[in-house]
Image (cartoon, rainbow, N blue to C red):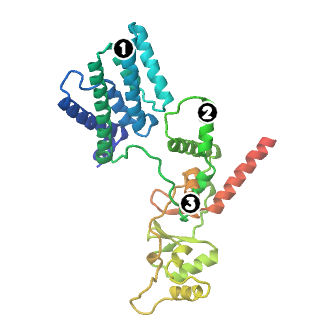
């Protein structure tokens, strides 16, 4: 039902996940802290801002364990010291905030609520030795419970790993350590480090996320400048096969038209799969130079009788999960799919899933070459 589907997506949105996480995390903190310290200062006000950051921006550098823990401990030290040694309230508050920020920057543990903690401790001072010790213990309990509750709620309830760790580079589709083609020419760590150094500022985003933002922006700009769609470049006279097409006939079509794939359609010409040369080769155990021809002949030859131990028709060897596109689809996302997933061809379908065209790597290269050539010629003129 549309209403239930919309409501479900709404409840699973990132904003509601963050609010639910903060609700659960705050509940754990309040119950635990009030149980062990029933006094008036059992929870520190800056903890509310900390929980917001932990659940709304869990991937942010300021939301990681060391910035949170370090900022609270250093700000506690700065606030208590200024409250003890600076008698003028205005100067005490100013120095407490400034010192906490300097310490956080110096020790690479920037977390904004820490400065609020330093300000609160400075304005509440001066503190006796026993009171200062109690406050330090209270700060430790608050930040420790915030970390523990965030780890439990994020990992167990929200299924969102915390703390954030950069994912190791997975093996590519060829089972090698090479990055995907679209990432080989993108940003690297040295580029990011140089840019941040040149800006001389703090960047509140993880390196992996910054690379993703850059790549998405480049893809969008490419699509905006090139402006081509599948309808502009696709082949329209598409050779197809049906589920019950004999393997020998399908192979003959591949050879006759010098193509590497056949979209498989049903009786209404709707796409149900694709049969490629690779699908044929997967049916043969021995693909050595000496045995491949014999085994291919055996695969293509129709088995007499009503039963067979091998595949006989295209539907038995086709790949059912097919990446497809529509005529109005821009070619920019197709470039990413073809390069990263090694797709030599993409069927183009209409709203009824009927095959209306095919885009191949050759079509893509020709279109990009012509568009670049025209752009260069216009610029030169």
The crowding category of the residue bearing disc 1, from other C-alpha atoms within 10 Å (few below 14, some 14 to 19, many at least 20), is: some
Give percent across and percent down for residue 47.
32, 28
Please state which of residues 210 and 110 is positioned toward the viewer in this rendering.
110
In the picture shown, does residue 169 fall above or below 279?
above
The crowding category of the residue bearing disc 3, from other C-alpha atoms within 10 Å (few below 14, some 14 to 19, many at least 20), is: few
Q: Quadrant of residue 147?
A: top left
In the picture shown, does residue 144 fall above or below 220?
above
Q: Are marks 3 and 2 in contact (CB under 8 Å)?
A: no
> Is the C terminus in the top left, top right, bottom left or bottom right quadrant?
top right
Q: Residue at x 49, y 80 (%)?
A: 283
Label 3 to label 2: alpha-carbon separation: 29 Å
Q: Circle 1 sits in a helix, a strand or a loop, which is it? A: helix
Seen in the image, is 93 located left or right of residue 356? left
Please state which of residues 178 and 9 is positioned toward the viewer in this rendering.
178
Q: Which mark is residue 177?
A: 3
In the picture shown, does residue 192 fall above or below 345?
above
Residue receiving disc 2: 197
Residue located farthest toward the top when viewing the structure as drawn: 88
* Disc on the earlier residue, 1 or 3: 1
Label 2 to label 1: alpha-carbon separation: 38 Å
Give percent across and percent down for residue 36.
19, 31
Residue receiving disc 1: 84
Instruction: Answer yes or no: is residue 116 visible.
Output: no
Please state which of residues 168 and 37 is positioned toward the viewer in this rendering.
37
């Amino acid at each position: 039902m549309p209403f239930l589907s919309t409501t479900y997506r709404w409840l699973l949105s990132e904003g509601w996940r963050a609010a639910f996480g903060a609700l659960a995390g705050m509940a754990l903190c309040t119950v635990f802290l009030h149980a062990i310290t029933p006094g008036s200062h059992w929870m520190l006000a800056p903890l509310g801002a900390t929980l917001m950051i932990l659940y709304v921006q869990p991937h942010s550098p300021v939301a990681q364990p060391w910035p949170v823990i370090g900022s609270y401990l250093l700000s506690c030290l700065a606030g208590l010291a200024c409250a003890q040694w600076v008698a003028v309230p205005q100067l005490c508050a100013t120095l407490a905030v400034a010192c906490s920020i300097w310490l956080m920057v110096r020790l690479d543990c920037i977390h904004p609520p820490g400065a609020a903690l330093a300000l609160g401790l400075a304005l509440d001072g001066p503190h006796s030795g026993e009171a200062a010790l109690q406050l330090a213990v209270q700060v430790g309990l608050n930040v420790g419970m915030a970390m523990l509750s965030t780890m439990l709620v994020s990992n167990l309830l929200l299924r969102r790993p915390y703390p954030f760790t950069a994912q190791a580079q997975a093996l590519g589709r060829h089972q090698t350590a090479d990055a995907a083609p679209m990432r080989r020419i993108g940003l690297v760590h040295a580029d990011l480090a140089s840019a941040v150094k040149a800006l001389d500022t703090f960047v509140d985003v993880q390196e992996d996320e910054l690379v993703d933002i850059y790549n998405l922006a480049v893809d969008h700009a490419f699509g905006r400048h090139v402006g081509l769609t599948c309808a502009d470049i696709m082949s329209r006279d598409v050779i197809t096969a049906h589920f019950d097409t004999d393997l020998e006939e399908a192979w003959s079509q591949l050879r006759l038209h010098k193509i590497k794939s056949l979209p498989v359609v049903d009786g209404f010409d709707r796409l149900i799969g694709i049969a490629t040369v690779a699908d044929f080769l997967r049916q043969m155990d021995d693909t050595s130079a000496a045995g491949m021809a014999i085994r291919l002949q055996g695969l293509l030859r129709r088995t007499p009788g009503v039963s067979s131990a091998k595949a006989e028709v295209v539907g038995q060897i086709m790949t059912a999960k097919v990446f497809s596109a529509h005529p109005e689809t821009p070619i920019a996302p197709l470039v990413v799919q073809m390069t990263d997933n090694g797709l030599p061809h993409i069927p183009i379908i209409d709203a009824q899933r009927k095959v209306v065209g095919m885009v191949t790597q050759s079509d893509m290269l020709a279109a990009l070459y012509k568009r670049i050539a025209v752009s260069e010629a216009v610029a030169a003129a």
